[in-house]
Amino acid sequence: MTNLKRLKGFIKKEFIHIFRDKRTMVILFGMPIVQILLFGFAITNEIQEARIAILDMAKDPVSEELSQKIMSSGYFHLQATLQHPRQIEEVFKRGEVKQVIVFPHDLDRKLEKEHRAVIQLIADASDPNTGTSLMNYTSSIIRSFQQEKNQTTSQPYQLVPEVQMRYNPELKGVYMFVPGLITIILMLVSAMMTSITITREKELGTMEVLLASPMKPGLIIIAKVIPYIFLSFINALMILFLGKFVFGVPIKGSLVLLLGESLLFILTALSLGIFISTKTQSQQVALMVSLMGLMLPVIILSGFIFPIENMPFFLQLLSNIIPAKWFIIIVKGIMLKGAGMELLWKESLILLGFTAFFILLSIKNFKTRLA
Amino acid sequence: MSNTRPIIQAEQLTKVFGNFTAVNRISFEVSPGEIFGFLGANGAGKTTAMRMLTGLLSPSAGKATVAGFDIYKQTEKIKRHIGYMSQKFSLYDDLSIRENFRFYGGIYGLSTSMIRKQTDDMLEKMGLTSEKNTLLKALPLGWKQKLAFAIAMIHRPEIIFLDEPTGGVDPVTRRQFWDLITETAYQGTTIFVTTHYMDEAEYCHRISMMVDGKIKALDSPKSLKKQFDAGSMDEVFLKLARG
């Protein structure tokens, strides 16, 4: 009972530290929002001025009206009007356009006879985010065009957009920024902030006073990390919320599983933070070690920005000991593919292993320091 | 003082780090209510010895009891009966005076009403009642030092360990701080204090002089001065250090 009361008082004190320090508050709440907005809008902004080309081989009323509707949507800028299919490859190679819309020469005839025609949408998917967004925008314009037309005609017809992605057909990296950001933010908040808050007590000399008190060392550490578990969790929710409602990043799998896995990763990051704090004596060193030892590998080796399969073999091997890599696989799996535990148990176990390993190492370090 | 059981007892206490002997077989006793000064140059082993007695470090050899508890097996019990003020200033700057009291009182498992009563009593005694909601960083160092002492006393410990409590403090505040220590001892709390200010030794009932991990002299300031034929404790120390 006394322990519970001690814990409560301690946690209260930690929250006071956090809420009274402007810098901490900015890192905790300002940064995630700014980062997701930056990443998100850097992608969506391009859509407003996207350069496209149209290859109209039909040159009939339907193709002309549809072209006009697409161009008047405000998302696109008509960079070129092509005359021959040969030119498609050329404009892509010169990087002039992001998308080419192709109307077949038999558009009119097909609509009349089969009530169905295919419109080809070819996108440059080397920037997969832009590629997919363009496809989605164009397809939805075509759909609404078709709906409008069918309301006034007695003979409904169907316009089918046929999507073709060039240069990156599997769209690796689509929506990657949300899984990647969650990983980075959780790592930053959980690992860096805990390592700093624990070394801060060492630097201040308060850790010694705490250790000379009847409060058990384990309890001190638990009390110090609980606020960060809580705040990291809020951060994860915030990013998912912004991702979904501002940028339309889907969550196809179970939200409960996603949050559970996030909690697991928070614990992994915390155990790393605690481990760093047992090895360092000052806040500055803890900050540097966290940045160099955690943030850089997370950004570079986790597959967030650079695809792991394109790395040299040595770096591929190295990426296996980056916990963030496994978490990104999990988040991608749940959010984008709707995967469940039956597909992700291996990655989850790996994270659990990392957590146990760093906690054991920290306990060992903590003891030797006091012996 | 002499007919009661010693509250601290150390026998051949030793701490070795690698091949460096920080504390070399020291033995002494401290009686209840005594101000026991632990003097020596920086690096003489004072802090290491104190850390062993407070349960922060486990000894390499020797025996010791603090408040009747064994320093090997009963550190948890020792921690409940002692107060500790470290070399560095050890309160939280971003917490108010009251919040600091409440936090440390909570760590020692005091009830909320008990903490409130103690806080009010101590602040009134120090004339700081009107400042109880002030953040610590807004206070002068001298006040902070006294508050740190008051907070180390919040659970009414039998012994209080002070590790260089007056480091970096101006002479007037040092003087006031020692008045506080003397008064506390008078009320029955045992004071175990390390310092390298030799003039502060005069305030202690008994002092031990540490040189290179060993206790070279142990007596009252008066007898030490007589024994070494010196006018001040400074002289005693210099004579000792030069062998």
Image: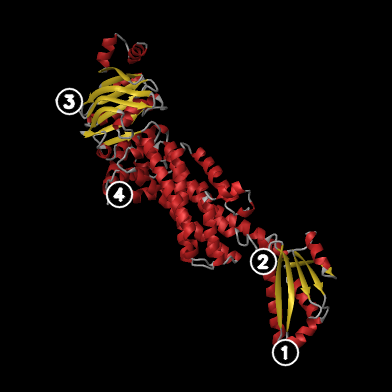
Q: Position of residue A320 (x, y in %)?
A: 54, 50
Is disc 2 placed on a helix, strand or loop? helix
Mark 2 surroundings: few (<14), some (14-19) or many (≥20) residues within 10 A: some
Q: Secondary structure at mark 1?
A: loop
Whether tag 2 and tag 1 are in contact, CB under 8 A, the answer is no
**Given the image, what chain letter belongs to the residue carrying mark 2?**
A
The residue under the point 52% across, 66% down is A339
Residue sitting at x 69%, y 78%: A144
Front of the two marks 2 and 3: 2
Residue situated in front as seen by the camera: B87 or B102: B87
Which element carries disc 3, helix, strand or loop? loop
Q: Are marks 3 and 4 in contact (CB under 8 Å)?
A: no
Closest to the camera, between mark 3 and mark 4, is 4
Judge by depth and name the residue closer to the eye, A6 or B189.
Answer: A6
Q: CA distance from mark 1 to mark 3?
A: 112 Å
Q: Are marks 3 and 4 on the same chain?
A: no
How far apart are the two marked residues, 4 and 2, measured between alpha carbons? Answer: 54 Å
Q: Residue furthest bottom?
A: A154
Same chain shared by disc 2 and disc 3: no
The numbered dot on residue A155 is 1
Residue A231 in sight here: no
- The answer to which image quadrant residue B10 occupies is top left
CB-based contact (under 8 Å), mark 2 and mark 3: no
Q: Nearer the viewer, residue A331 or A217?
A: A331
Residue identified by numbered label 2: A132
Q: CA distance from mark 2 to mark 1?
A: 32 Å
The local crowd at label 4, few if under 14, some if 14 to 19, many if 20 or more residues have their Cα within 10 Å, is: some
- Residue bearing the label numbered 3: B1
Query: Going by the image, does A360 lie left or right of A304?
Result: left
Which residue is disc 4 drawn over? A3
| Amino acid type, mark 4 | Asn
Q: Chain of mark 4?
A: A
